[in-house]
Image: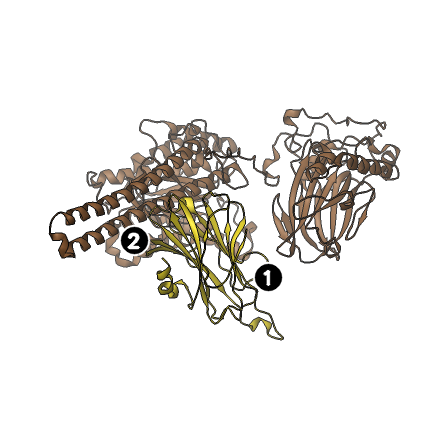
Chain colours: A yellow, B brown
Amino acid sequence: MTVNMTKGQAISLQKSDGGTLTAVRMGLGWQAAPRRGLFGSRTREIDLDASAVLFADKQPVDVVFFRHLVSDDGSVRHTGDNLVGGAGQGGDDESILVDLARVPVHIDQIVFTVNSFTGQTFQEVQNAFCRLVDETNGQEMARYTLDGGGQYTAQIMAKVHRSGTGWTMTALGQPANGRTFQDLMPAILPHL
Amino acid sequence: MTVELVRGQNAPLPQTRLEIRVSAGKPIVAGATLSDAQGKVRGAEWIAHPGSPQLPGLEVSQQAAADHRLAVDLEALPDAVERVNVLLALPVGVGGPVRFGAVAAPFVAVTGLDGAEVASYTITDLDPESAVVALELYLRNGAWKVRAVGQGYAGGLAEMLADQGLAQAREIATQILDAVARGMARSVAAPPPRTAETDRVRRTAATAGPAGEHGAAAAASQPSPAPQPAAPQPPTTPQPSAAGSGGASAPPETPSTSGVNYAHPSRRPAAAAPPTPPPAAPPAQPGQPAQPVAGDATGWSMEERLYNQVWGMFEDLARTTAAYRSAVDFAESRMEQELDKVLSDPRSRIGGTGDAAREAARAKQAKLVDQAREVLDRDLAQLKAEADVVEPALPPAFAAWDNPVWHAYRVPMEVPMALRLGDLHLPESADVRIPLLMRLPLERGLWIDAGRSSSGSVTFHDSAELHRLAMETAVALAARLLAVYPPGDFAVHAIDAGGSAAGPLAPLLQSGVMAQPSGYGAAGVTEVLARLTKRVELVQMAVRGGATDALPPDLDTAEQLLIVNDFPHGFDDRAVTQLRYLADEGPAVGVHLMLVADREDASAYGPVLDPLWRSLLRLTPVPDDHLADPWIGHAWTYQPALVPPGSAVLQQVLGQVAHARREWGR
């Protein structure tokens, strides 16, 4: 069951069978900038970046992004930077996998963000989407469409946080501005 | 651009109109099935075979043949099709071979319409199978790709089609084979198979005997020998028994009828064959924590899988420890913050509230640390269990000296992937020891540090004792290198200007594996260095000029290891410069350094030797935490791979190496 999210909406997601999540993936996909005319390679490529920030009691402990692809504890893995995007509607161009069973005990929240590294706002980006997938069964749990979304260059997508013995995911969809996750820290903190 | 695919590998397809060429030594059936996104063949109309050779976008031959060309237009295929399976089968009931083990390895190539090869794949290691899925062309993210599959079916076409989800698989298989048998009647004999590749020659030699499958036509077209009566199987070549029947391992028992057999009658061809697909590690029981299995990693050979597994364990231990340390640090800092808050709060000074708050903060910290410890203990137990199954399975090059595999040592024929230099562990995990495996050939020199360790944990050793231990470590490592290289492919030299290392060097000298006497005194140093420098220069020149065959015939092609004891004793400036040259340029042309030195002794040189020290991998003769892992940078305690006291394994192994060298005259 996919929930199509709109900007600012926040809901809690439990697995439909009542079980707990063990592995989640945030996938990000967008359409490469169109090539025009002669010197087509000079068209400005669009580079969106997915990041995940690991928090322990509201302090950032570790971050996974294109310069640090695996968290030190090995629980969060980024599959690699994509600088130009892909087809847009097809598969994910960047994804971050979280093995919740391996997350260190003190980490209680993981926040996923998307930034436009090259500075285009989501208004200019074609067919961009962001989705959260339950990695154990491939089921898509939430999807945002980022294009036409307004004059901002980043979005705080969602957070996965501990609740009881398991994990819960809350979709945040908070627009923000920033080149990398560091610029987003002030915007993230109210959501913790 | 041609890609030689190995089983399971894929490659992108640059165009959608393609030809697939198939060649096998004997007439075989080639067909294709189309399947949808779920991998299901929707019906008989999605199968192209000799009885129904044309589908939209796909055409196959109408008969069995030794060579096929299948035409594919991926854009013309029905919309729901996401995969095209190219399959090969042996014709049934026409007197030909009944298993792929008895024919040459089929070769499949994907080409453009202009004939340019895009990808090719030789299907090896088939034996009782009579049908095989050779390739699949599949749609991934809107682009077509090709993958080498090589999945064989001993039950033939019917089993293969049933596997693709066809209900009426048996009927269709029968229909296809009937069509083939009809076509067979008008086919001509297979041309003699190509003999370009040694692999193919060998297989052909094993199976070239039966000439009977095509009766008169075969007899007419094959120049030799006397035609066999057109009897059905079995072929006249004595079939190897089931035990040794893998086509590759069975030596040819009759001389080839179609040319000279170049295969050595007793040499096992494993080395020349394409990488064998791994015998799959037993899958983990569903629903249970996976039982650790030795070799449970990716790789083309058991050796590579074990190597990857050891490195995987190394990374897992590094990361799980990082998680633990990070949790403990966080718990500490949170407790300190909370204690500070209690202190600064004036209300807490009255009554017991302050004590209670302090207590609570400490309890919170202890609870988190306990939780983290629990997770760490769980992970360590898992890694320990894995290490317990992996250690006994390691080949000599990866095994510790106390591993029984060293007692069953035989001189190797090939250079191993890597060498165990010692063990690594962290303070949290004293009982999980990770082998430190270094790739061969060595990419950098080694420095066995005879100086006092920075951690100060070894103050009880005096400096002479440390020096002796360092030299023993060096000799144990050198012996290991000598033992894991094929005899004669590795040579050891030693510079021992002061003559102080005669004791530790004795095993190498006595067994005769180190032929030359060590370089004694300044003259000896100069002589050894000059010889090796000249060698590096010559080989470099030859490699750069592309004239490796022009090297002087007396040049020793073995990899060279130079053990320098007591550096810089006996070295003048010129010798130091030569040594630095060897350290920088040597590894690329097979000259390696092993320095046994105390950095303090060389302090007179000042910072000019810093690059030399940095270029060498520092090892210590006693356990010391100085090695960092590449992921987190923990300080790992290194323990050298030493021979257990009282063990004669080193002498025994070196004796075998020396014996093999004499035997082979190297």
- List x then y, in percent, for residue A42: 56, 73
Q: Residue furthest left?
A: B350
From this viewpoint, is residue B112 visible?
yes
Q: Quadrant of residue B189?
A: top right
Instruction: Kindly state the secondary structure of the residue where label 1 is placed.
Output: loop
Q: Position of residue B478 (x, y in %)?
A: 39, 39
Image quadrant holding the C terminus of chain A, namely: bottom left
Seen from the viewer's position, the closer of residues B205 and B658 is B205
Residue A74 drawn above or below residue B190: below
The spot of residue A12 in percent (x, y) is 44, 53
Q: Quadrant of residue A38?
A: bottom right
Give the number of the disc on residue A87.
Answer: 1
Q: Nearer the viewer, residue A42 or B4?
A: A42
The mark lying in front, picked from 1 and 2, is 1
In the image, is residue B441 above or below residue A28? Answer: above
* Element class at badge 2: loop
Q: Position of residue B147 (x, y in %)?
A: 64, 47
Amino acid type of the residue tagged 2 in the rendering: Asp
- B1 sits to left or right of B540: right
* Foreground residue among B620 and B583: B620
Q: Residue at x 52, y 38 (%)?
A: B414
Q: Is residue B399 above or below residue B537?
A: above
* Residue receiving disc 2: B572
> Which residue is depicted at the point 26% across and 56% down?
B605
